[in-house]
Image (cartoon, helix red, strand yellow):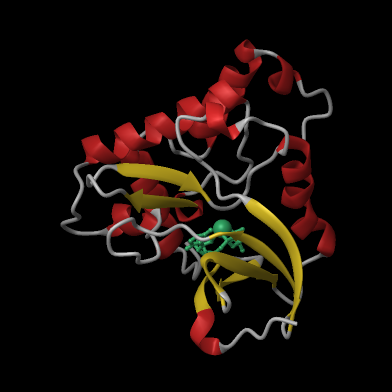
Amino acid sequence: MIEIKKEHYIAEGLARTCYRHPENDSLCIKIGKPKIEKSHLYKEINYFKKIENKDSSKFDYQFYAAYYGEIETNLGTGFVYNLIKDEVSQNISLTLRHYLEMENGPYTDEVLFKALGRLKSQMITHKIFVGDLRARNICCKILENNTLQFIVVDGIGHRDFLPFADWFHFFAKKKVERRFLRANMHSLSAQRDLIKRMRAAGETIV
Ligand SMILES: Nc1ncnc2c1ncn2[C@@H]1O[C@H](COP(=O)(O)OP(=O)(O)OP(=O)(O)O)[C@@H](O)[C@H]1O
Ligand SMILES: [Mg+2]
């Protein structure tokens, strides 16, 4: 059994707490929070099973954190994922929310928006959808050449009964565009405004 300690804590969302894997530097372990239903946790896992045969060598880059299965830990069942880190510093990558809230961040909006557009087009091309599109669910990985890769770390999947978007490019494009619009992710200022509204409403996990 894997022993997770306080020092391994990375961050948390509403449903899960994310820790470093104590025995493997390139992985993280997510543990469901006490009141969260199992079915909620398994939604994303089931989608991973559905997309496991996608040929990632055709991706422009690995644009969502790979999932490696379950392990038993002292905190209960853990879900193992690739840990997103910046290339040179090896720091855990910050999320888009961090960058959008910075006063004088290291990247211009133009650079951030371009990286976001690249993520979006990957989602359309490879028909991989994100139900919970939020700035806190996108890690911004800094590469050696100082460019950015936006990587989705949470919320992939969809609940369409008739998944036309899984089958046809036209519907995939429509679906992703609709999702970006609905999530206020079509522009950085819209996303910043959303984050501000959440902060103003006293939400602790933004
Ligand atoms: N693979 C990863 N690599 C680096 N950091 C990560 C990774 N996965 C999650 N994180 C960090 O941990 C936080 C919480 O993880 P996650 O988003 O999976 O929790 P959640 O409870 O499912 O979130 P939500 O409230 O959005 O549903 C993220 O916002 C991010 O800061
Ligand atoms: Mg999250």
Whole-percent x, y for residue 15 in the image: 66, 65
User: Which residue is pictured at 64% across the width and 68% down the height?
Assistant: 30
Whole-percent x, y for residue 44 in the image: 72, 49
Q: Indicate the quadrant containing the N terminus: top left, top right, bottom left or bottom right.
A: bottom right
Can residue 120 be seen in the rendering of this structure?
A: yes
Count numbered badges in the picture.
0
User: Which residue is pictured at 73% across the width and 17% down the height?
Assistant: 167
Of residue 67 and residue 31, the one placed in the foreground of this image is: 67
Res 170 quadrant in image: top right
Tell me: residue 199, above or below residue 8: above
**Relative side of 142 to 5, left or right:** left
Can residue 186 be seen in the rendering of this structure?
A: no
User: Which residue is pictured at 72% across the width and 36% down the height?
Assistant: 51
Res 72 quadrant in image: bottom right
Of residue 61 and residue 110, the one placed in the foreground of this image is: 61
Quadrant of the image where one finds ligand 2: bottom right
Whole-percent x, y for residue 24 in the image: 55, 71
User: Which residue is pictured at 68% across the width and 13% down the height?
Assistant: 168
